Image: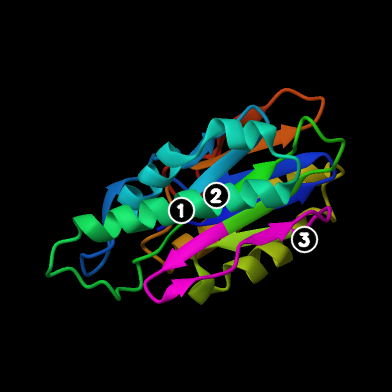
């Protein structure tokens, strides 16, 4: 499982993700690794966080057509291509599942959360997501308003509300809104990690802004509370 956080900036997007990968079909979600980088570049100005079953999301990423992404005239066109790729990944997953696998398991989800900006358009930033589940899929979510956000994962632990509250606290003491957002992301993942064994590990971030070099790195290490 994953906690994936995307925040729309005036000129780009901020992505934050935990690094824990588990086997969702084991009773307590056996940890495979705590240091998986779930953030991937899909163009020079757009990146994605993978969410859910790895076999499906890996296939989804591999089927994204670079020419469609690079020639897109609007964020809507980007989300249409992401939706198509997620469907490809989901359909591939269904053909590879063994008969004894519980296809209705709550972990049986796959999606991509994307964000960035379009270099050929003088528009602001955008974030968007596509999520596939056994009983269907949500309509693609697209946000273009500054400071709008999408949080996937940990919904049963109120992850989005935790992030909002943490950001409100951080911005009271931080002059830099980006730093406040980053610290709120760490606080959110660490708080959920205490009660949800499917979440945690190394926390990474990526910032894409028009006119700036891409900024990415590690916010917090493998152990709870270990800052880098």
Neighbour tally class for label 2: few under 14, some 14-19, many 20 plus, Cα within 10 Å: many
Q: Is residue 149 above or below residue 101?
A: above
Instruction: Report the front residue among 196 and 25.
Output: 25
**Image location of residue 226, percent across then percent down:** 50, 43
**Position above or below: 1 against 105:** above
Residue 112 visible to an observer of this rendering = no
Q: How is the image coloured?
A: rainbow
Residue at image mark 1: 86
Q: Residue furthest top?
A: 213
Residue 215 shown in magenta: no
Q: Residue at x 44, y 73 (%)?
A: 136
Spatial separation of the CA atoms under disc 3 and disc 2: 34 Å
Image quadrant assignment for residue 150: bottom right
Callout 1: SS: helix
Q: Which mark is residue 82?
A: 2
Q: Quadrant of the N terminus?
A: bottom left
Q: Are marks 3 and 1 in contact (CB under 8 Å)?
A: no
Q: Is residue 63 left or right of residue 80?
A: left
In this rendering, would 115 be left or right of 224? Answer: right
**Looking at the rendering, which quadrant does residue 30 occupy?**
bottom left
Q: Residues within 10 Å of mark 3 (few under 14, many from 20)?
A: some
Name the disc covering residue 169, or none.
Answer: 3
Q: Which residues are magenta?
A: 130-148
Residue shown at the point (83%, 35%) measured from the top left: 121
* N-term mark: 3 or 2: 2
Cα–Cα span, label 3 and label 1: 35 Å
Camera-near label (3 vs 1) is 1
Nearest to N terminus: mark 3 or mark 1: 1
């Amino acid at each position: 499982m994953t906690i994936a956080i995307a925040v729309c900036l005036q000129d780009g997007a901020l992505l934050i993700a935990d690094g824990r990968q588990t086997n969702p079909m084991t009773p307590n979600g056996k940890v495979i690794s705590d240091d998986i980088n779930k953030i991937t570049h899909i163009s020079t100005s757009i990146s994605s966080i993978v969410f859910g079953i790895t076999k499906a999301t890996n296939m989804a990423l591999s089927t994204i057509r670079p020419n469609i992404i690079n020639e897109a005239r609007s964020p809507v066109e980007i989300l249409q291509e992401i939706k198509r790729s997620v469907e490809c990944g989901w359909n591939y997953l269904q053909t590879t599942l063994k008969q004894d696998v519980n296809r209705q398991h709550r972990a049986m989800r796959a999606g991509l959360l994307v964000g960035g900006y379009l270099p050929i358009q003088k528009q602001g930033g955008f974030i968007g997501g596509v999520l596939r589940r056994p009983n269907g899929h949500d309509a693609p979510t697209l946000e273009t308003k500054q400071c709008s956000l999408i949080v996937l994962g940990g919904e049963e632990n109120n992850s989005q509300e935790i992030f909002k509250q943490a950001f409100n606290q951080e911005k009271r003491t931080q002059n830099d809104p980006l730093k406040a957002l980053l610290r709120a992301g760490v606080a959110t993942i660490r708080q959920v990690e205490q009660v949800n064994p499917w979440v945690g590990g190394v926390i990474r971030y990526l910032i894409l802004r028009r006119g700036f070099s891409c900024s990415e790195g590690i916010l917090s290490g493998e152990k709870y509370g270990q800052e880098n």
